[in-house]
Image: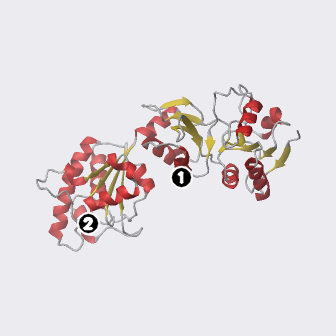
């Protein structure tokens, strides 16, 4: 067969060339495309004949499966049984990028998935509208190709199309992390080093949620940040968000005043609405009222085991675990509210 070669400017790729590549992939062809790591052979994973041909072209044992490449992280849930907390931490830091993660697949077994940091690859994945695998464009056992010349050397006449996009940005294969085992395992150290993987997974995120993200969650976030700073802790990220308020509003005047008495300045705080993404990547989610707990579970039921009422950690002896909204109440109620929150935050700081 004759392999078609199209030269593509990586800075300003010709959309027609990418559409042609996507069309070939959708119809069951093999296309060599660039990623930021190395060149890969893209193929439609839903087409059994295409995958068999890919194994033959690469001379790869058929017990070694290929990883999927996706163009947005939301696609993960289409293919995996569950997305573990560690995956969200790694995605936040390294996706799109040179990281392949192995999950438990929806259809049994395991599946490797990566989101490349290359706009040509991402656009082709998007245009193809079929799940694509993209192993390195080499014969198994040979070095992975880092430019067009290396990619075409062994594949000319064996694939349908090759995009010549110059050298790969990184020139090193992706790091492969197995998330199906506990503790997680680095199966292949590529561009991202083992230490970076384990440091990222080890880092914890605490999320405080209230209604408007202008008083209670602001107090809790500020108090915990101060507590951690005073104790020299740098391994914890502290966030706050609201369920109902618009983004970008400041902390209430009374909140700023009571926190100022603790030596804390929150004049730069800006409210944000809680998102499923934020919930998914938090190790512990602390809410102020039972209503908040209910609303969050409606958005993200998978976080149930990490969701708590903040007042559960306080020593207040009453049956009401809600920390009531101080908005519209007198200054002394704000001071009482901060006292309850501070007590709970102190305990949380000793646990995390």
Which residue is rendered at x = 83% and y = 49% of the image?
6
The one nearer the camera, 158 or 213, is 158
Q: Nearer the viewer, mark 1 or mark 2?
A: 1
Locate the C terminus by quadrant. top left
Left or right: 215, with 76 as reference point: left
The residue tagged with tag 1: helix, strand or loop?
helix
Q: Position of residue 316 (x, y in %)?
A: 13, 54
Q: To which residue does mark 2 refer?
A: 255
In terms of sequence position, does the residue under pointer 1 or pointer 2 come before the other?
A: 1
The residue tagged with tag 2: helix, strand or loop?
helix
Which residue is rendered at x = 54% and y = 44% of the image?
94
Q: Position of residue 268 (x, y in %)?
A: 37, 64
Identify the disc placed on residue 74. Answer: 1
Q: Is residue 99 visible?
A: no
User: Measured along the vertical axis of the image, is residue 341 above or below residue 114?
Assistant: below
Q: Position of residue 15 (x, y in %)?
A: 76, 58
- Crowding at mark 1 (Cα within 10 Å: few <14, some 14-19, many 20+): few
Q: Which residue, as the protein is rendered here, is positioned at the far left?
A: 317
- Crowding at mark 2 (Cα within 10 Å: few <14, some 14-19, many 20+): many
User: Measured along the vertical axis of the image, is residue 135 above or below residue 305?
Assistant: above
């Amino acid at each position: 067969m004759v392999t078609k070669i199209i030269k593509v400017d990586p800075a300003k790729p010709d959309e027609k060339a990418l559409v042609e590549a996507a069309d070939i992939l959708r119809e069951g062809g093999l296309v060599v495309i660039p990623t930021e790591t190395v060149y890969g052979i893209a193929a439609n994973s839903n087409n059994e004949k295409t995958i068999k041909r890919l194994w033959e072209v690469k001379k790869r044992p058929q017990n070694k499966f290929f990883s999927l490449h996706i163009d947005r992280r939301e696609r993960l849930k289409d293919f995996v049984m569950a997305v573990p907390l560690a995956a969200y931490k790694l995605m936040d830091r390294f996706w799109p990028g040179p990281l392949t993660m192995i999950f438990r697949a929806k259809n049994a077994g395991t599946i490797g998935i990566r989101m490349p940091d290359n706009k040509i690859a991402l656009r082709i994945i998007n245009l193809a509208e079929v799940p694509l695998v993209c192993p390195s464009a080499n014969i198994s056992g040979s070095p992975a190709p880092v430019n067009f010349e290396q990619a075409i050397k062994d594949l000319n006449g064996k694939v349908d199309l090759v995009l010549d996009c110059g050298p790969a940005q990184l020139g090193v294969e992706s790091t492969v992390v197995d998330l199906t085992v506990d503790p997680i395992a680095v199966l292949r150290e590529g561009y991202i080093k083992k230490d970076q993987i384990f440091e990222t997974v080890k880092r914890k995120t605490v999320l405080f949620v209230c209604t408007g993200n202008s008083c209670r969650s602001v107090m809790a976030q500020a108090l915990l940040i101060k507590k951690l700073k005073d104790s020299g802790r740098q391994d914890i990220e502290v966030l706050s968000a609201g369920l109902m308020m618009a983004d970008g509003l400041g902390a209430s005047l009374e909140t700023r005043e009571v926190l100022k008495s603790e030596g804390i300045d929150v004049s730069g705080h800006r409210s944000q609405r809680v998102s499923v993404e934020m919930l998914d990547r938090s190790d512990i989610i602390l809410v102020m009222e039972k209503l908040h707990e209910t609303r969050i579970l409606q958005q993200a039921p998978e976080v149930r085991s990490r969701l708590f009422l903040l007042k559960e950690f306080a020593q207040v002896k009453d049956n009401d675990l809600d920390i009531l909204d101080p908005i519209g109440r007198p200054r002394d109620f704000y001071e009482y509210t901060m006292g309850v929150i501070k007590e709970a935050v102190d305990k949380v700081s000793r646990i995390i």
